[in-house]
């Protein structure tokens, strides 16, 4: 139980910090708008950087929780005789 609480705390902490990525995008955008540093690559990176939050949030969860990691791996690899459905039904009891 303690290990699960530790994983949950770690996951939630990282997910809480992910929105700070938006701050990087705002700074890059302000540098371009203010004319301090103009670059086509930086202009394009604003949207890409903000997209990382949506991508990283579920990846953090999958990384820190073995059952999600196993489930994702089994679904992506399409393992025969997968225990994913058995695992899910045994947890619902």
Image (cartoon, helix red, strand yellow):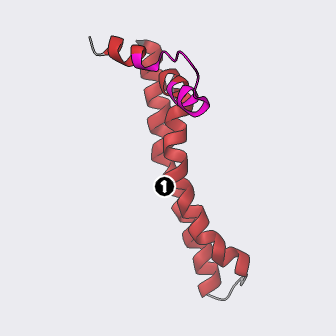
Residue closer to the observer: 50 or 14: 50
How far across and how far down the image is residue 84, in percent? 46, 20
Q: Is residue 45 left or right of residue 89?
A: right
Q: Residue at x 54, y 64 (%)?
A: 23
- Residue 45 position, x and y percent, is 65, 70
Residue 74 included in the magenta stretch of the image: yes
Q: Residues within 10 Å of mark 1 (few under 14, many from 20)?
A: some
Q: Quadrant of the C terminus?
A: top left
* Residue at horizontal 57 percent and vertical 55 percent from the top: 52
Tell me: residue 58, above or below residue 47: above
Which of the two residues, 45 or 3, is positioned nearer the viewer here?
Answer: 45
Looking at the rendered structure, the secondary structure element under dot 1 is helix
- What secondary structure prevails in the magenta region? helix
Query: Residue placed farthest to the front in the image?
Result: 80
Horizontal placement of 18 versus 1: left or right?
A: right
Outermost residue, bottom side: 35
- Observer-nearest of 46 and 70: 70
Q: Is residue 41 left or right of residue 33?
A: right
Q: Position of residue 82 (x, y in %)?
A: 52, 18
> Number of labelled discs?
1
On-image quarter of the N terminus: top left
The answer to if 49 sits in the magenta stretch is: no
Q: Which contiguous range is marked in magenta?
A: 71-85
Residue 31's place in the image compared with 12, above or below, is: below
Rendered residue at 61%/30% (across/down): 77
The picture places residue 91, in percent across and down from the top left corner, at 34, 14
Residue at mark 1: 19
Residue pictured at 44% horizontal, 18% vertical: 4
């Amino acid at each position: 139980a303690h290990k699960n609480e530790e994983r949950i705390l770690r996951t939630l902490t990282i997910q809480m910090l992910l929105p700070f990525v938006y701050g990087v995008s705002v700074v890059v955008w302000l540098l371009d708008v203010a004319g301090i540093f103009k670059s086509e690559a930086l202009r394009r990176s604003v949207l890409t950087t903000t997209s990382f939050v949506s991508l990283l949030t579920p990846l953090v969860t999958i990384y820190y929780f073995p059952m999600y990691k196993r489930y994702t791996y089994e679904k992506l690899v399409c393992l025969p005789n997968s225990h994913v459905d058995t695992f899910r039904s045994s947890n619902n009891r």
